[in-house]
Amino acid sequence: MSDRQDHPDRLTVGVVGTGYVGLTSAACLAHLGHRVTGVDIDARKVAGLCRGEVPIAEPGLDTLVAEGLARGGLAFTTDLRALAESDVVLLCVPTPTGPEGTADLRAYDAAVDSLAPVLAPHCVVAVKSTVPVGTTARTARVLGRPAVSNPEFLREGHAAHDFLHPDRIVVGGTDPSAADRVAALYDGLTAPVVHTDPTSSELAKYASNAFLALKVSYVNVLAELCERLGADIADVAETMRLDPRIGAAFLSPGPGWGGSCLPKDTRALLHTAAEAGVDFAVLAEAVAANRHQHERVVEKVRQAVTGSTEGSLQGSRLGLLGLAFKAGTDDVRDSPALAVAARLAEAGAVLTGYDPGVDRDGFPGGVVQLVDDVTLVAKDAAGLVLLTEWPEFRELDWPHLADLTDHATIVDTRNLLDSATLTRAGFTYFGLGR
Ligand code: UGA
């Protein structure tokens, strides 16, 4: 990462909300040389951040925060009045799903209302939160100043890297000088900048996440078809990947897509389309296919563990490997692993789970007994189910784990493991789509 502390066009930046997007934006913009203040209503979190304690597991973020704090280019507070001198304020508050799939804008609206009396006349507001189409224009009206839509595309687990190496920067504004100021935040990053109107910018964010969801649903259904036809999804997906029009990423089958964004944003886009009178059936089908995928994993486990599609899982001890919604994060929000676990528990299974990234603090509990030692998920298990693609699972002592189980059966919903290695270790191995 380059040292751009002496940024010639250093801006004074306020960041409202210090979640994944807000904290990453604050730390990275400070790294790029801007003078950044992050504001959050959570006093404990702010106190921790002031001491350099980063509450999320994001590679490199703690270093960036420490660097910013040490240099004085980064500060955190609960007091919005600290943003009075800001040239740009980024809104990074959460917009969770509300009733009927609409975005719940209460936190967002509260932040906007609180900012109104604070901001200097020249300050531009940039909307980084994923917000329904029309929200940026409404924000501009409420605040009586230019607002620019500037969606964020970073992935959890790669947040700092993605912020500093974006594929694209989107600046949606009607006021050219406000849009230019927001674009100037990213001077020094090499990425195409899409200048557009706020409506297109807001929609582009939903469109991107929904398309990723669609892609994974497509490959998950294809995997099912492969099983029926005797084809191998790995080879089918590899063939597709080599076509640049399709793209190499997001073609790995799994237990379904999840996380804090794809489920929320597909619901919100479906709602927006319905309100606009557009039948977005292809996206609705992708959402339905995702639910079906959770059920399909349960049926696969039933078949693997009981040897029959009709077998009962009542009282079966199952060990779950991975609970986070994907590898590289401790986040279990809307995790497909938990959706599958809920269905397995409904079928009567008794569940123990291990995840190298998830500890008791971040775990909601419920139907899975969380353990911190992988041997405990294997002990006396009727079967193992791998649900998150942590690379370290490849290195486990599989012969030892096989010995610990009652029945050395494993369903690998991520096709992560080498079936020959597992078979040699004594397991009966089931992947997806092969
Ligand atoms: C997603 C987008 O990828 C980011 O670009 C976006 O900025 C972010 O949402 C957001 O809106 O904030 P993220 O939620 O971190 O990022 O998760 P992804 O990496 O997109 O993964 C989503 C889900 O799809 C995970 O459950 C993952 O395991 C699953 N997936 C992904 C598959 O099952 N197969 C694949 O081939 C790829």
Image: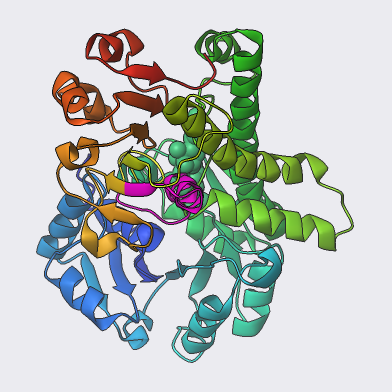
Q: Is residue 93 left or right of residue 384?
A: right
- Classify 2 as above or below 261: above
Q: Is residue 227 visible?
A: yes
Give the image location of residue 248, x and y in percent: 52, 20
Give the image location of residue 186, x and y in percent: 41, 49
- Classify 355 as above or below 73: above
Q: Residue at x 63, y 59 (%)?
A: 176
Which of the pair 328/116 is nearer the observer?
Answer: 328
Give the image location of residue 403, x and y in percent: 17, 24
Q: Residue at x 53, y 41 (%)?
A: 257
Q: Quadrant of the N terminus?
A: top left
- Classify 95 as above or below 391: below
Determine if the magenta segment contains residue 221: no
Q: Is residue 152 left or right of residue 42?
A: right
- Classify 73 as above or below 429: below
Determine if the magenta segment contains residue 346: yes
Q: Residue furthest right?
A: 277
Q: Is residue 254 visible?
A: no
The quarter holding residue 88 reads bottom left
The quarter holding residue 276 reads bottom right
Which of the pair 253/203 is nearer the observer?
Answer: 253
Which of the pair 384/303 is nearer the observer?
Answer: 303
Give the image location of residue 417, x and y in percent: 33, 19
From which residue to which does the magenta span run?
330-351
Which of the pair 248/296 is nearer the observer?
Answer: 296
The quarter holding residue 24 reads bottom left
Q: Residue at x 20, y 50 (%)?
A: 371
